[in-house]
Image: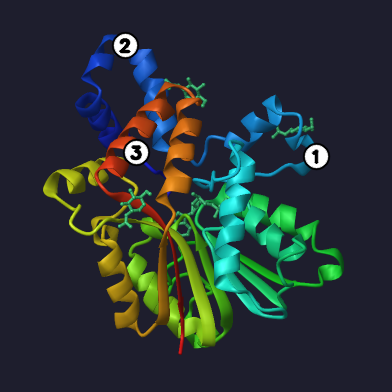
Amino acid sequence: MASILSPILSALSWLLCLPWKLVHLASGFLHALKKNLSDPYFVDFHSELNATSGEHHQSQTEWINMGYWKETNDFPTACKALALKLVQVAQCKSDGIVLDVGHGCGDSLLLHLEHPSIPRPKRLVGITSQIQHYRRALERTSVRNPGDSVDMCLTHGDAVYRGDTPSHPLDAKTYEGAYTTILALDCAYHFRSRRLFLEQSFKCLAIGGNIALGDICFAPGSLSLTTRFMIALMGSMPSENVMTTEEYVAMLRGIGYVDVKLENITQDVFPGFVTFLKGRGLAFGILASHFERLVSRGMLFVIVSASKP
Ligand SMILES: C[S@@+](CC[C@H](N)C(=O)[O-])C[C@H]1O[C@@H](n2cnc3c(N)ncnc32)[C@H](O)[C@@H]1O
Ligand SMILES: *[C@@H]1O[C@H](CO)[C@@H](O)[C@H](O)[C@H]1NC(C)=O
Ligand SMILES: *[C@@H]1O[C@H](CO)[C@@H](O)[C@H](O)[C@H]1NC(C)=O
Ligand SMILES: *[C@@H]1O[C@H](CO)[C@@H](O)[C@H](O)[C@H]1NC(C)=O
């Protein structure tokens, strides 16, 4: 899934949601807009920030998530805070076997290698779907794992195992009961499907192991036809992943997970992210407006955690 928004749906959404901007409809502009919207993950938020904000030159972070903006208005700081929140909920164990799916450019992997408050795993496994992100993560983690003290294994591919990726981390033939922790930071709503991913993860978790996700779902009773249509316009969430908090929790219990927790952190994620997007040019401003409408209709950012009994 390379894009958050398919170009056609984006253009449609643009026309539907903001007709007053029609005045600006010139072909060159539309082209730039489509290009921007078709693959937001490809736009280097991080290198733009690198160029404008001196303080990040050294740290060289390349986060791409919606951020936890409670104590900051700085994008990389917010991204890191969200990642730390997820890892805390997951209660990673020292010498554990951690799987991080949708790790993007690898900043969350680096936390497991370096961060003082996170226990060092014995083995760190990752899979992410964009080849550029995968290469970046490989490069960055290999130079920051002195003496290869953590056994690393990264794979380029879809988080859901479909029998066609060699050494896929969710291939139960090899990895049944393997992981003490599975993490999915701001990505599971993309998967086809999230349920399939959660089922495969259940098999591959060790007994007593935890899964934690930073994910998107919806308030109970909010999923009207109009809301569903607006979600479809975003083009980033397959319809089978569109569910309420109650449905999400019930799905996890149905798969066999116990100790299921869902924390609503919408207030500390979306407003900050929307403000950030609005400062990134018109295309992102449009995305931000669409986001705001969805938030007012019950879209939630949640931290979900569960264990395998
Ligand atoms: C919002 S970014 C989060 C990246 C990273 N977790 C971070 O916080 O910096 C979502 C990531 O999930 C990846 N992704 C999307 N769909 C995926 C899939 N089906 N399987 C694996 N990764 C996927 C994207 O390529 C992207 O790197
Ligand atoms: C980020 O800043 C550093 C230091 O100024 C520079 O060497 C590097 O090329 C920049 N990276 C990107 C992707 O812009
Ligand atoms: C989640 O939090 C948001 C923001 O504080 C709030 O408006 C909403 O009612 C909450 N929804 C649920 C289902 O907890
Ligand atoms: C596309 O994105 C760039 C970088 O974020 C921004 O400067 C530019 O204004 C955007 N173009 C349009 C048409 O929104």
Q: What's the residue type where badge 3 is placed?
A: Phe
Graded by Cα atoms within 10 Å as few (under 14), some (14 to 19) or many (20 or more), the crowding at tag 3 reads many
- Of pointers 3 and 2, the one earlier in the residue sequence: 2
The residue furthest right is 147
Q: Residue at x 56, y 51 (%)?
A: 131
Q: Nearer the viewer, mark 3 or mark 2?
A: 3
Measure how far apart labels 3 and 2 are at the Cα level: 21 Å
Residue that carries the numbered disc 1 in the rendered image: 58
Give the quadrant of residue 250: bottom left
Q: What's the residue type where badge 1 is placed?
A: Gln
Q: Is residue 260 left or right of residue 9?
A: right
**CB of mark 3 near ligand 1 (< 8 Å):** no
Q: Are marks 3 and 1 in contact (CB under 8 Å)?
A: no
Give the camera-side residue of 116 and 145.
116
Numbered badge on residue 24: 2
Q: What's the residue type where badge 2 is placed?
A: His
Give how far across and how far down residue 300 sits, in percent.
35, 52
**CB of mark 1 near ligand 2 (< 8 Å):** yes
Residue that carries the numbered disc 3 in the rendered image: 291
Measure how far apart labels 3 and 1 are at the Cα level: 32 Å
Up-down: is 246 above or below 256? above
Up-down: is 261 above or below 77? below
Give the camera-side residue of 220 and 179.
220
- Of pointers 3 and 1, the one earlier in the residue sequence: 1
Q: Is residue 281 left or right of residue 71?
A: left
